[in-house]
Amino acid sequence: MSARDKHNRQGRYAAPAGDFEDRLQASGLRMTPHREHVFSVVCRELDHPTAEQVFLKAKESMPDISMATVYNCLEKFVECELLRLVQLDRGATRYCPNMHDHSHYYCESCGDVFDVDFDRRKLRQVLDLPQGAIPMGYEVAVRGLCPSCREEQTEDISPNQSKLQPN
């Protein structure tokens, strides 16, 4: 069993069918079988897939879909605010269907990415923003070991060994 299989997935994201179609139409796009399928692939799991991963999963049940179609769909979904981009350092761009305020936790060992809820008001309290600044958005990424990978480690990692120490 892979580390990914061991993670407790709390649910799946899916925009209500009407919302999905409404957002597409508001952007001048129509619902197509390819768009519907690509979106369902991204929403099926909480694994923040890359475009290549979406393509491989989509191709399993829709063999005629091309990589270009997947890229085009993902780009349009980001423009329609149905998906958000997740950039973790120099790795491949990932896609997240959770459009609520949240940050991401990246496991350094298995590469899984998890959504982490946060309270925007509390975050503003701990950030030392310039006087008069008005934040328009937050992109927070936390790195470490997920619970499954942590259990697999043979040695404890103490806070003294960690690159970033919590306060």
Image: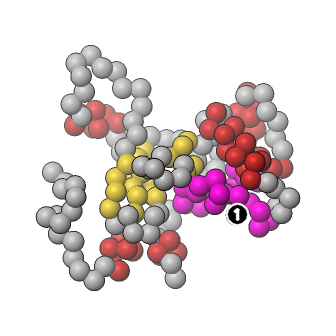
* Span colored in magenta: 37-61
Q: How is the image coloured?
A: secondary structure
* Among the 4 quarters of the image, the one containing residue 57: bottom right
Answer left or right for 165 relative to 118: left
What is the chief secondary structure element of the magenta stretch? Answer: helix
Residue farthest top in this picture: 132
Answer left or right for 121 relative to 32: left
Answer left or right for 84 relative to 150: right
Q: Position of residue 18 (x, y in %)?
A: 74, 39
Magenta segment includes 99 = no
Looking at the picture, does residue 11 appear above or below residue 118? Answer: below
User: Does residue 137 show up?
Assistant: yes
Residue at image location 60% in from the left, 43% down from the top: 83
Is 81 or 156 nearer to us in this picture? 156
* Among the 4 quarters of the image, the one containing residue 126: top left
State how many labels appear: 1
